[in-house]
Amino acid sequence: DAGITQSPRHKVTETGTPVTLRCHQTENHRYMYWYRQDPGHGLRLIHYSYGVKDTDKGEVSDGYSVSRSKTEDFLLTLESATSSQTSVYFCAISESTGVRGYPPLHFGNGTRLTVT
Amino acid sequence: AQSVTQPDIHITVSEGASLELRCNYSYGATPYLFWYVQSPGQGLQLLLKYFSGDTLVQGIKGFEAEFKRSQSSFNLRKPSVHWSDAAEYFCAVGSNSNSGYALNFGKGTSLLVTP
């Protein structure tokens, strides 16, 4: 299994509070991603990173920010949590150069976030 | 943007029976296609992938998938299902947009295996 650790695994927070989720990888992969998973929606891309300090928005980025100060860490921050951000958040990583075709994503075990 | 559709939200099969999970893609050129499996409380695990070449690809856990361009499909199959195959299955396609190597996922098919 790819070395991806997400923390915390579970979190309950109140509306309006800031929340930071962490993803740590030991694979030295260039690309890192944050997805959210919701019933009936599958997985949707929030933000991704293509290197240290290089990030960009995904499909559902409103209300979220990210940072990547080291290759191994990718942080997802909810500046002011809302109930609509109750979800399961997955971090994923992928290789880039030297891979034939399209590199697969490798996923962490997720963080279940409940906003009350 | 490239997308995939999984027409079946839930599927129930008996243990030992064959399985086919459907996936249709929307993309003009040859897409990069993947199948993932998710067990409860776990992350997604790659079952198999298709880029080009042989249209029948073998994956882990005895799964295979067949790429059919004429039907825009990439269906997942297994000849004999085991109780441990009960899980959520996701089809995904390479986004081919400015998002690194992100994948666009279908909404998933939940597989229930009965004794």
Image: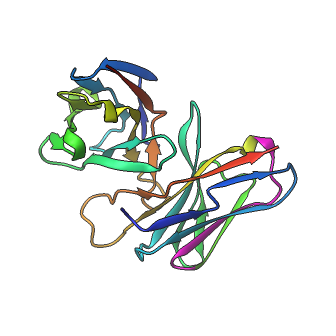
Give yes or no for residue A81 being in the magenta stretch.
yes
Query: Residue at coordinates 50% horizontally, 54% vertically from top-left?
Result: A109
For the image, the number of numbered tags is 0
Which percent across, then down, holds residue B25?
36, 34
Can the viewer see residue B32 in this picture? no
The image position of residue A74, as x and y in percent, is 59, 70
Give the percent coordinates (x, y) of residue A113: 69, 49
Q: Which residues are magenta?
A: A70-83
Q: Position of residue A52 (x, y in %)?
A: 55, 79
From this viewpoint, which residue is outermost toward the right? A16
Residue B110, compared with residue B99, is above or below; it is: above
Using residue B53 as the reference point, say whether residue A47 is left or right of it: right
Q: Which color scheme did the rendering employ for the protein?
A: rainbow
Q: Nearer the viewer, residue A1 or B99?
A: A1
Q: Is residue B63 magenta?
A: no
Q: Is residue B94 above or below residue A101?
A: above
Give B85 or B68, whichever is nearer the viewer.
B85
Residue at horizontal 33%, vertical 60%? A103
Identify the residue at image location x=34%, y=30%: B23
Q: Nearer the viewer, residue A23 or A65?
A: A23
